[in-house]
Amino acid sequence: MSVRHSARLSPFQPETVWTLEAGTLVETRGRIERRFPLSGLTRYRLAVARDGRRRTLLVTFGRRRLVIVSQSYVGPGRFEDRLAGFSTLARAVAAVGADLSPRARFGVARLEARAALTWMIGLTAFGAAAALLFSLTAGMASVGVDLAARMVFVLLLLLAVLPWIGAGAAFDPQDPPSDLLP
């Protein structure tokens, strides 16, 4: 038995159909068919919109990515909710993917605060080094050292916060939370 979900992604594309067949996730859009064996699954992330109605499944197979959406395009600004079929497919992909690819990571896509903070730390460190270098080349070493010292202080404060920022919520693929997949 195969599990199937379909949605129209845009007005100028044919309907996209995702099917789970014998351990392989198949995406069919018109005549184009892509196959993703779940034994190569590396990451499974479920995203829920703020309004709670739209859900998106982001599935990664090494460098290949697949996006499955819960709503289908009907017309300008109008979407049809196909959450029932989406939830069935997302649960099936999680269960089969966990069995066939035990090293895969399963989680909920949220705002990546840790990644944003890491970027802030890197840019602040680069800014401190650039300010010091440019002030030395301009012959204003005292101003550059003062400015770089203040930026390094901010850098230390950012580094102190980093261990308390979570890496993201994970869930059991055999029993996903009911608020994510009703």
Image (tube, rainbow, N blue to C red):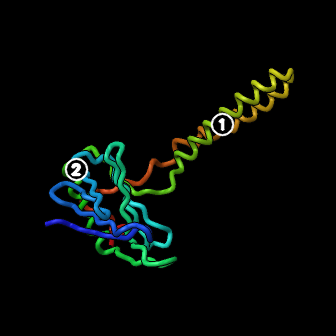
The C terminus lies in quadrant: bottom left
Image position, residue 105 (x, y; %): 33, 48
Depth check: give the residue in front, 2 or 156. 2
Q: Are marks 1 and 2 in contact (CB under 8 Å)?
A: no
* Label 1 vs 2, first from the N-terminus: 2
How far is the residue under mark 1 from the one under mark 2?
44 Å
Determine whether the residue tagged by mark 1 lies in a helix, strand or loop. Answer: helix
Instruction: Give the number of marks.
Output: 2
**Residue 25 appearing in the image:** yes
- Which residue sits at x=47%, y=78%? 75
Tag in front: 1 or 2: 2
In the rendered view, would you say 122 is above or below 17?
Answer: above
Q: Which residue is mark 1?
A: 155
Q: Quadrant of residue 180?
A: bottom left
Residue depicted at 47% across the width and 49% down the height: 166
Residue 55, x across and y down, in percent = 40, 67
Please, what is the three-letter code of the amino acid marked with disc 1?
Answer: Leu
Which residue extends farthest left? 1
Q: Residue at x 32, y 63 (%)?
A: 29
Residue name at image x 30 percent, y 75 percent: 84
To which quarter of the image does residue 120 belong? top right
- Number of the label disc, if any, that sits on residue 82: none
Q: In the image, is residue 96 above or below residue 165?
A: below
Spot occupied by residue 118 in the image (x, y as percentages of width and height): 56, 41
Residue at which label 2 appears = 37
* Kind of residue at badge 2: Pro
